[in-house]
Amino acid sequence: MNWDRISGNWTQLTGKVKEQWGKLTDDDLTEIAGKRDIMIGKIQERYGIAKDEAERQLDKFSSDY
């Protein structure tokens, strides 16, 4: 699924996002609101990983859904 579809279906996908990245809070998900760059930053912040790793995880997630 491309990111435009994820962004458009954000409300329906928040459960899947929380399954994948359980450290993201409801406030984080509200702030992200389907915006890829913000999500990458939140994943980096919550998991203490590099930007390229966060992007890799997000790319895998978006290709799976």
Image (cartoon, grey):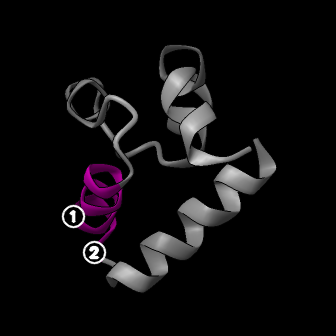
Image quarter of the N terminus: top right
Assign a secondary structure to mark 2: loop
Report if the CB atoms under discs 2 and 1 are less than 8 Å apart: yes
Farthest-out residue, right: 64
Q: Main secondary structure of the magenta part?
A: helix
Quarter containing the C terminus: top right
How far is the residue under mark 2 from the one under mark 1? Answer: 5 Å
Q: For mark 2, does the 10 Å Cα neighbourhood hold few (<14), some (14 to 19), or many (20 or more) residues?
A: few
Q: Is residue 55 left or right of residue 2?
A: left
Residue type, label 1: Glu
Determine the image quadrant of residue 41: bottom left
Instruction: Note whether 48 is above or below 21 in the view shown.
Output: below
Q: Is residue 54 left or right of residue 61?
A: left
- Given the current orientation, which residue lies at the most extreme top position? 12
Please give the name of the residue rendered at 27% of the width and 75% of the height, measured from the top-left corner. Answer: 48
- What amino acid does circle 2 point to? Gly
Residue that carries the numbered disc 1 in the rendered image: 45
The residue segment tinted magenta is 37-48
**Residue placed under numbered mark 2 in the picture:** 48
Q: Height in image: 31 above or below 59?
A: above
Up-down relation of residue 10 to residue 42 (above or below): above
Say if 55 sits above or below 64 in the image: below
Task: Pick the residue in front: 13 or 18.
Answer: 13
Q: Position of residue 26 (x, y in %)?
A: 29, 24
Density class for disc 1 (Cα within 10 Å; few <14, some 14-19, many ≥20) is: some
